[in-house]
C-alpha cells in the first residue's frame, strides 16, 4: 500500500470521527430536553381530581400557600420549604386500605434520600381531627419519619381539602365529615422548587416509585445545570 493510500485512509478516519463528534454535540441537547420533566397544568390532570374552578385551565400552576402543623407541633408554611424539591401525598393513620402500602413505599423514598438535603416529604392527614400532632409523632416513629426530612402534617379540614383539590390534585371529592367522603388517591406528587407539579406516581406500586426516585434525580439535575 502506498503512502498516499495510507494518508487517504487516515484522513477518512479523521473525517469519520469528526462527523461522529458533531453528531454527538447536535444530539446532546435533544437528550437533555427529553430528560427534562414536564410541568403540569390543571388541564393535564384527570378532571375528577381537580376542583371545578380549575378544570381545563392551561398554563402556569403553582401550589397555594398553606399553614399546617407537623408531628412536632410546629407551624409550617411554604416558606419553610423554599429551595427544596417536595414529594407530597395524602393519607390517614388509621387507614387499612391503600395507606399502609403508600407508607411502605414512602419509607423506601425516605431511606433512599435520607442524606439528600434538597428533598423534603410532605404527608398530609385527611383526618386531621383524629390525627393530632401527638398521633402523627407516634406514627412517624413507627415509620422512620424524622424531621425535617419527612413532615407529617395536620390542620384545618377544609384547608387540607383545598390543598388536595386545588393545588396538588390528589383527591376525588370534597370531605363532608365521614371517612368515605374524602377519597384521597394513592398518588405521590413530585413538586419542584418553584412549587410546580412535575410528576404523579402510584404510591402503592413499587415500579412506579422506582420511576419517581429516578425522576427526582432528573429534576435535581435540572437545577444543577442551571
Image: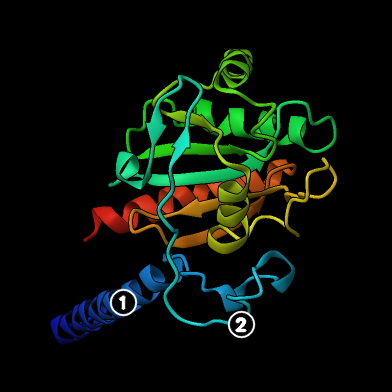
- Horizontally, is 205 left or right of 226 in the view? right
- The answer to whether residue 12 is above or below residue 32 is below
Q: Quadrant of residue 86?
A: top left
Q: Residue at x 45, y 31 (%)?
A: 113
Of the numbered discs 2 and 1, the one sitting upstream in the chain is: 1
Helix, strand or loop status at disc 2: loop
Helix, strand or loop status at disc 1: helix
**Front-most of 42 and 7?**
42
- The location of residue 71, given as percent across then percent down, is 51, 22
- The location of residue 82, given as percent across then percent down, is 29, 46
Q: Are the two marked residues, 2 and 1, in contact with CB atoms closer than 8 angstroms?
A: no
Please give the label number shown on residue 63: none
Give how far apart the Cα atoms at labels 2 and 1 are: 45 Å
Please give the label number shown on residue 20: 1
Q: Residue at x 21, y 61 (%)?
A: 226
**Front-most of 17 and 9?**
17
Q: Residue at x 75, y 59 (%)?
A: 173
* Whether residue 161 can be seen here: yes
- The answer to whether residue 217 is above or below residue 45 is above
- The location of residue 19, given as percent across then percent down, is 28, 82
Binning the other alpha carbons within 10 Å of mark 2 as few (below 14), some (14 to 19) or many (20 upward) gives some
* Whether residue 211 can be seen here: no
Colour theme: rainbow
- The location of residue 11, given as percent across then percent down, is 18, 82
Looking at the figure, which quarter contains the N terminus? bottom left
Look at mark 2 in the image and give the residue it sits on: 56
**Front-most of 174 and 191?**
174
Amino acid at each position: 500500500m502506498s503512502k498516499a493510500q495510507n494518508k487517504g485512509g487516515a484522513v477518512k478516519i479523521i473525517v469519520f470521527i469528526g462527523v461522529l463528534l458533531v453528531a454527538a454535540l447536535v444530539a446532546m441537547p435533544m437528550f437533555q430536553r427529553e430528560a427534562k420533566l414536564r410541568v403540569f397544568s390543571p388541564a393535564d390532570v384527570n378532571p375528577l381530581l381537580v376542583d371545578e374552578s380549575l378544570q381545563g385551565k392551561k398554563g402556569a400552576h403553582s401550589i397555594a400557600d398553606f399553614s399546617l402543623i407537623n408531628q412536632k407541633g410546629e407551624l409550617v408554611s411554604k416558606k419553610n420549604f423554599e429551595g427544596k424539591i417536595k414529594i407530597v401525598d395524602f393519607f390517614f393513620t388509621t387507614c387499612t386500605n391503600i395507606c399502609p402500602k403508600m407508607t411502605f413505599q414512602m419509607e423506601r423514598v425516605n431511606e433512599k434520600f435520607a442524606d439528600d438535603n434538597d428533598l423534603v416529604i410532605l404527608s398530609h392527614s385527611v383526618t386531621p381531627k383524629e390525627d393530632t400532632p401527638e398521633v402523627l409523632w407516634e406514627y412517624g416513629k413507627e415509620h422512620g419519619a424524622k424531621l425535617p426530612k419527612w413532615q407529617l402534617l395536620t390542620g384545618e379540614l377544609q384547608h387540607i381539602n383545598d390543598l388536595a383539590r386545588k393545588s396538588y390534585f390528589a383527591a376525588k371529592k370534597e370531605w363532608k365529615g365521614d371517612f368515605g367522603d374524602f377519597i384521597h388517591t394513592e398518588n405521590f406528587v413530585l413538586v419542584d422548587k418553584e412549587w410546580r407539579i412535575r410528576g404523579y406516581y402510584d404510591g402503592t406500586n413499587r415500579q412506579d416509585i422506582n420511576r419517581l426516585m429516578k425522576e427526582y434525580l432528573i429534576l435535581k439535575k435540572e437545577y444543577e445545570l442551571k
